[in-house]
Amino acid sequence: MATRMSRRDFAKVAALSSVALTGCKRGQPNDALANAALNASAPRGSRAFPRDFFWGVATSAYQIEGAWNEDGKGPSIWDTYAHTAGKISNADTGDVANDHYHRYKEDVALMKDIGATAYRFSISWPRIFPQGTGTPNPKGLDFYSRLVDELKAAGIEPFATLYHWDLPQALQDKGGWQSRDTAQAFADYAGYVAEKLSDRIRHFFTINEFRSFTEAGYKGFEIPAAGGTRTVFLAPGLKLPAQEFHQVCHHAVLAHGLAVQAIRAKGQQGTKIGPAENIEVAVPLIESREHSKAAEALTRELNAPYLTVMLEGRYTDAYLEESGKDAPKFTDEDLKIIASPLDFVGINVYTGKTYVLASDQAPGWREVGFSKGHAKAAISNVPLGPASIYWAPKFVQSLWRAKEIYITENGCAGEDVLADDGQVYDTERIMFLRAYLTQLQRATADGVPVQGYFHWSMMDNFEWIRGYGNRYGMVYVDFKTQERTPKMSAHWFREAAKQNAVV
Ligand code: NOJ
């Protein structure tokens, strides 16, 4: 096995940490409470998550699988993009990535070691339909079938995402998401996968981060940079005029709705379906009723072309007015499809979009953004905002009455290095986890129906245009040797999962 730290070593570290915790001085005056808090096996009371909460880890196909042209897989837009000079830092590609396609058994064993009870992975559309439509490739499906069997045998619940951005290149050549036909092709593929795998996969996510792949793929995404902002792209890296861009967004949510219907038609009874969207959440700067209401109203608008239309079946007036003549063209029937009933809502939450205060001027809120010195995650430059993971699910419940919510991604990139003793002391990730999960636990304690958390990512992987430079994993990967080493955050996660509580 290629892991630097064996599973036995890993168990030893976990055991040692509880010895250290329970071994501190006992019986001192007035320290009964302190001892209870330090006793790692004590029930966590107010820091506990609901029973049966899923402690999950997440990845996606292009970012970890490799085997880009094996066993009949067709090329995706990411193969094309990464093979184009100048698009990816360091000229990295996903050709080999984590070689997970060949090492999936080892990776499932690692997930079990770090205490994961659920795994969110994505299915590569061009592995299943090399041309996007037409004849399926049995070897592609077989890979996921074997992966699911391995997960089940390890007691890990599989959650599958059907689209994590690797569109078959053959469909891009016919117009990609600019074409309405892509939405139908996606639904056909989704229905096929559900028919074949829903005997073992109970939860399907249709599409990952509608906002990211449409905005960065078809318009360019503005990100803060020294001296202002800069535009970054994801595959296929187009800069479309506004109307065409809005149409792409419409086709994406339409694809989601058609896929929901196809999965219901072809999947086993009881199959659960929802999106995995990077909700933009406005966070009340001060937690009073009026500021929270203002933040809720802004959150609804911020998500107008994505979650809001999926959950309400209409584009907001403000969105249509703002897009004016460039608004998407759609029918009432489209809206009905887009809003096909869901079983749950999945949200990726890394930070808040902005802080907000109530205002007596229309529209009733005032965005205050982030101050210059606001703390940021070291590598990705994302402002830290633990309260976002409290407010995001809370608003999903209050705005749209969601009955089941999953945090489908949350995490941070770190400057992780292997220390001389072979360990990775990623203290910032542990601080991040503790801060965010404290807020998530607070949401569950308020009765927000969050039923699982998926950490991004299970292991370091191909971080899109940043290549292998941004390490998001709880497991360190040496991309030259493919050695995997659980970081200290993995030990933290294991303990939290064991206690079902923030630790
Ligand atoms: C969102 C995406 O879904 C995932 O692919 C990406 O690696 C992480 N965020 C981190 O940027």
Image (cartoon, helix red, strand yellow):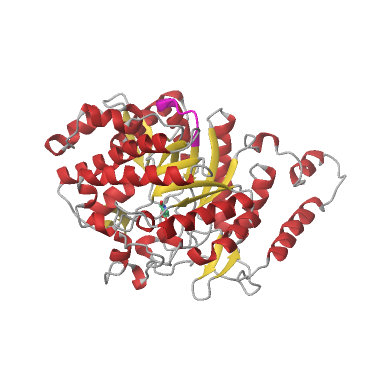
* Image height of 187 relative to 463, above or below: above
Name the quadrant of the N terminus: bottom right
Q: Is residue 98 left or right of residue 217?
A: right
Number of on-image labels: 0
Whether residue 294 is visible here, answered yes or no, is: yes
Name of the residue lying farthest toward the left: 325
Q: Is residue 129 left or right of residue 344?
A: left
Query: What's the residue at 19%, 52% (across, down)?
Result: 175
Query: What's the residue at 51%, 44% (across, down)?
Result: 201
- Expressed as whole percent of the image width and height from the top left, the position of residue 260 reads 37, 36
- Expressed as whole percent of the image width and height from the top left, the position of residue 94 reads 39, 66
- Expressed as whole percent of the image width and height from the top left, the position of residue 4 reads 63, 71
Q: Quadrant of residue 233?
A: bottom left
Query: What's the residue at 68%, 47% (across, down)?
Result: 498
Give the magenta range.
Answer: 398-405
Query: What's the residue at 46%, 59% (across, down)?
Result: 378
Q: Is residue 401 magenta?
A: yes
Q: Nearer the viewer, residue 26 or 395?
A: 395
Q: Is residue 248 left or right of residue 190?
A: left
Whether residue 380 is visible here, answered yes or no, is: no
